[in-house]
Image: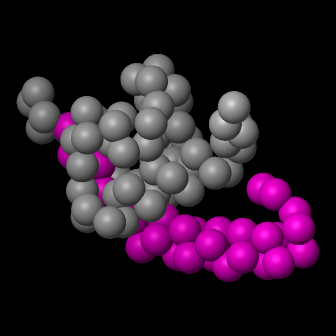
Amino acid sequence: MKERRSKLQILADILEALAQSGEMNISQLLTAANLSYDRLSKYLSELEANNLVVIERQSLEVKIKPTSKGLSFLQEYKKIKEIAVAFGISL
């Protein structure tokens, strides 16, 4: 059975998907982050509140983009994860 992802890992997965594509709509991000709509909405609200993503709402279309702060967070998270793995710690 797969190990459950931590909240931090889920946030990083969302940012990683956005970093790779530049921008995504909700359905693309649902698939890329492997989350339900409700959970994705909750995490996106938190990321937006902390200025890690920008959500552009244009009539029926929603585009989500990472901010420079979000990309910096992702880089630092990757460094921390590498160190944790080197010491046998899972995040």
**55 relative to 84 in the view: left or right:** left
Q: Main secondary structure of the magenta part?
A: helix
Task: Please give the name of the residue rendered at 68% of the width and 79% of the height, measured from the top-left corner.
Answer: 79
Task: Please give the name of the residue rendered at 48% of the width and 65% of the height, measured from the top-left corner.
Answer: 70
**73 relative to 35 in the view: left or right:** right
Quadrant for the N terminus, please: top right
Residue most toward the top?
38
Q: Position of residue 28 (x, y in %)?
A: 26, 41
Q: Quadrant of residue 29?
A: top left
Residue toward you, 46 or 24: 24
Q: Position of residue 44 (x, y in %)?
A: 46, 40
| Residue 44 drawn in magenta | no
Q: Position of residue 49 (x, y in %)?
A: 52, 46
Q: Is residue 7 above or below residue 54?
A: above
Q: Position of residue 86 (x, y in %)?
A: 82, 78
| Residue 80 visible | no
Q: Is residue 42 above or below residue 8?
A: above
Q: Which residues are magenta?
A: 62-91
Residue toward you, 6 or 87: 87
| Residue 88 visible | yes
Q: Quadrant of residue 80?
A: bottom right
**32 relative to 28 in the view: left or right:** right
Residue most toward the left?
59
Task: Please give the name of the residue rendered at 58% of the width and 45% of the height, measured from the top-left corner.
Answer: 10
| Residue 67 drawn in magenta | yes
